[in-house]
Amino acid sequence: MISLNSGQYTYRIRGDIESVEEQLTRLYPDSLNHEFAVADFDIEIQQTSLLRTLLRPQVTLNIEGHKPFNPIHPSKLLPSIEWAMNWCVSAYDHTKLLIHCSVAVNNGKAILFPGKSGSGKSTLSAYLGLNGWHLYSDEMAIINLDTGYVEAVFRPASLKNESIEIIKPFVQASEHYMSCTTKGTHKGDIAHVRTMSKDVYDTLEPCKIAAVLFLNFDKKQRFNAYEIDKSIGLAKVISNGFNYSVTGEAAFSILVSIVNQATILEVSYSEMADIKELIAELVL
Amino acid sequence: MTPSGISKALFLATLTQQKSITELEPKEADSLLRAAIAAHMHGVLANTVNQRLSLLLPLPLSRHCASIHTFSFAQKNQVAAAAKLLSEQLSSAGIPVLLLKGAAYIVGSKPNAQGRLISDIDILVQREALTTVENALQKNGWRAKPLNDYDEKYYREWSHELPPYIHSESGVTLDIHHNLIPLSSGKTINIAQIDATKVWVANNLYIPSDAYLILHSAIHLLLNDDTEKGLRDCFDLHSLIQGYLASGSVDSLRAIFIEANCEAEFSILIHLLNRIFKTQYSELLSTGVQRLSWHDRVLVSSLYKTIFPRTDYLRHNKSALARQHVYIHGHLSKMPLLLFIQHICYKGYRSAVKRLLGETFFKSLPPKK
Amino acid sequence: MQTTDTFLIHRLADKSAFVVFNRLNWCTYIISFNQVIENLNEGIIKSISSKDFIVLTAKEQIDTLFKADYWDTFK
């Protein structure tokens, strides 16, 4: 059994985790095995069936007594646990507004990168996290419904396919770590990257959202950034919400306030270096 | 390492508020939370925690409770809006919308509505009106969920409901019932009487009378092969029956069960509720309810075992035999022996395949053209 | 922001739209400012001209639209 503290949320992970324990220890240094009496979420790894175990092994993730996912091959366990940890938050925490995006912070100000796979948001935010920025979160913005400030989680970034090789050269400092690559998941090859130490994470404060960037990664495009109407920005942010319809009035009011005060841009790019200058300006 | 878990007794005592969650040791509170979520009872658990109590709880617990309150409140609005829209959509086809189960409790503001979490909306329509209903739904953006041929046949020929419909925009799932129990069961539910005694909520929207809400919930609990939500059904029933007895008599309630050829089920139900809620049913047992046969005593015992979720956080007897007993009883109540054997052989084949090759073996088959 | 029993209504800071949350059915509406101006020009809202509307403050604009029963569309 593993007790995992991601700062915001604590997880109890039970069952046969031997195959991923070493990786988890390196992705979550100083945040495993301080056992807590009450956990936010409980995940159990269960075997599925007799013959499967002999022929083609499968495990299921039992989350709080339910099984929301199809079974997986044990080799896919690491990314599956990471996905399950995200799922727990979006399924059970409605005390915060949760938006599907990555969040990078510098100079006490946050930039949100909402959007679908392929927009390059994970690659960019991992790059930023490894180059002087703080990666508050790779998958979802955790927004305080009273203040509109975004909060950090101690979780690694998740990279797919070509992004893994793109980011590898930047994993240099002692507080960085890139996990092994899990091949052939339904999203392709996956690796996880820790961008900071637990000590640094513990210093991170909730921050104001300075900008929301909708990214479009296109090798053929020249760099192009333009401000869009706040009405379109609001619509796009809402469409990326995990629990907007659950958090109701409070979510509406705080999102309007965030969209009113933040700079909202659409950015097309082919090189990460092009964007870096723009976003540095946004958090001055 | 397996958690030590809490006893069934402690689990029930906190859910029924005989013990406050703040009296529990942290590890016990943790087990309580996990068991409640596994049992679909976290809404009931959250009801026992008000704002003041919440401050005394460990953060994970207070956060879960606050989230459930938010979710439950949102769901109440969503169900009301969906029910209103549905009632308008079927109004032009001349079909009244009679809600059942969870949606009925929420829209009808029943005592168990608070924290009652639902996953779909159930309605009851006349059998003769089924085609009209399906046409009206399809015109308004509802689509039938694709099923394999066997399940589709089971639904339409043997069961008491159509395959589920899903709204293409909102994603709401709709279960359309034309009876409360399959035609092959030998039980006779007076659908006309349910319709005649239905309670108006708004415009074209209705819910059954309290007595029929209780009957339906009891049938669902006792004659269903799936007891995953059994404990929740018991809490629903307890709440509805206590509400009913505040102004109605046990004789009039039993009369509804007798009319449905479910007198034995009424006794079984009260005996089962007595095991869970104890003192509140002892008077009823001594005056208004039959003694049980040996078989029915065993059934009550089996039911009591199976309504609790299988989780390491609840210390209890995970008796396979009890579950088997309930499964067989559930099905025999619903279909003649010959059909049951055929159904069991097919299901048994699927089950054996699942056990050997895994749950999703059938899900991965390509859809038939 | 304007709050009633039924609605929460804002005008966005860049004046690109009015945004409405219906507290009864929990729907969110985004009505572009240009759409409202078009409605004014078409005479759908008769009480004021688009020229006079544009110079009003956000609160005044929302109130004017209340008086014209404009928000009833989103009930």
Image (cartoon, coloured by chain):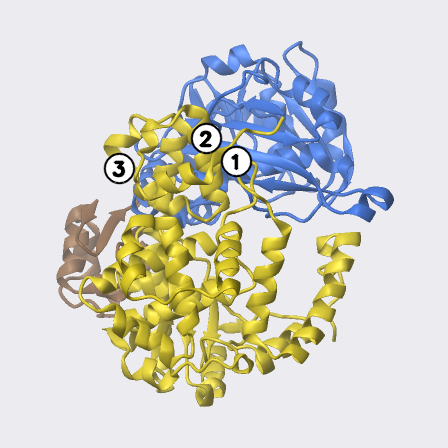
Residue at position x 53%, y 52% from top?
Answer: B306
In this rendering, the answer to whether B263 lies above or below A206 is below
> Which of the two labelled residues, at mark 3 and mark 2, occupies the earlier sequence position?
2
Report whether residue A251 is seen.
no
Split into 4 quadrants, where in the image is the N terminus of chain A?
Answer: top right
Position in image of residue A137 (x %, y %): 53, 29
Residue at mark 2: chain: B
- Compared across the picture, whether B84 is left or right of B11 comes to left
What color does chain A have in the rendering?
blue
Of residues A19 and B24, the one drawn nearer to the viewer in this rendering: B24
Position in image of residue B347 (x %, y %): 70, 66
Give the quadrant of residue B345. Answer: bottom right
Residue annotated with mark 3 = B50
Q: Amino acid at mark 3?
A: Asn
Residue annotated with mark 1 = B313
Mark 3 is surrounded, within 10 Å at the Cα level, by few (under 14), some (14 to 19) or many (20 or more) other residues, namely few
> Which of the two labelled residues, at mark 2 and mark 1, occupies the earlier sequence position?
2
Residue annotated with mark 2 = B30
Letter of the chain shown yellow in the rendering = B
Of residues A151 and B302, the one drawn nearer to the viewer in this rendering: B302
